Image (cartoon, rainbow, N blue to C red):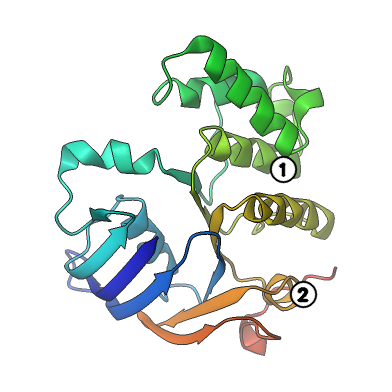
Amino acid sequence: MIKLTNVFKKYNNGTWALKGISCSIRQGEFIYLVGPSGAGKTTLIKLLTCEERLTKGELQIGNANLLHLQEQRIPLLRRQLGIVPQEVLLLDNLSVYKNILYSLQAVEANRKSMKQKALEALELVGMTAYQHALPGDLSQGQQQKVVIARAIANRPKIVIADEPTGSLDAKSSIEIMRIFYQLNQLGTTIMMATHNSTIVNTIRYRVLEIRNGEIIRDQLSGNYGLPSDEQDIFII
């Protein structure tokens, strides 16, 4: 489903953010992307979501080769992806439900289908009871659930999440991880960038570790997290 072959990314300031990384991710896998700040995790996510273009190498998502992908085809590719960014970007003047509908307008023409997808997404993340609330009336954890609902409303095959539990307390983080677990059980491929070694070690899935723009570890599962000097304080 996702295949990277000798992928390089060089920014305009001359920095090589990724240096020849290669890996394959099958449909239905759950991947933790770990490593220190500045290692290249966010750059990799930006390449996958076409926010940035790779400098050289091969990057395939399904049948699409991102090195040669035409600009007009990028929106079509993004419809296959559910993107959960680091920042909680919701429209403050719209209800939770209308936030989901608004995001669906770009990919769905049928109004009835849009409403059904929005309600299904809210139910999956446990936010149906808050569908008429404004984002500002929600806790951080609840807002993150809405962001996930928005990302999955179009039923993507792949969900890419950048530090989705980074600003949350332990209880909220566990709730978010349960949602990702449930999505993965339904066959959705999950790629999640995280600094949280306790989550990685407790809820065990495949781990890709990036340092200095290179993949230095590809571990299918096991008791593995970040070095002790980079762990977050997190107790489940």
Type of amino acid at the residue the image marks with label 2:
Thr
Type of amino acid at the residue the image marks with label 1:
Gln
Q: Is residue 41 visible?
A: yes
Q: Nearer the viewer, residue 233 or 226?
A: 226
Residue sitting at the far top: 111
| Picture quadrant of residue 32 | bottom right
- The picture places residue 148, in percent across and down from the top left corner, at 61, 42
Rendered-image quadrant of the N terminus: bottom left
Q: Secondary structure at mark 2?
A: helix
Left or right of residue 50, residue 31 in this image: right
Question: Label 2: how many residues lie within 10 Å, few (<14), some (14-19) or many (20+)?
Answer: few
Q: Secondary structure at mark 1?
A: helix
Residue at the location (66% across, 85% down)?
Answer: 224
Q: Mark on residue 140? A: 1
Q: Which residue is mark 2?
A: 202
Vertical relation: 177 (above or below) 144: below
Q: Nearer the viewer, mark 1 or mark 2?
A: 2
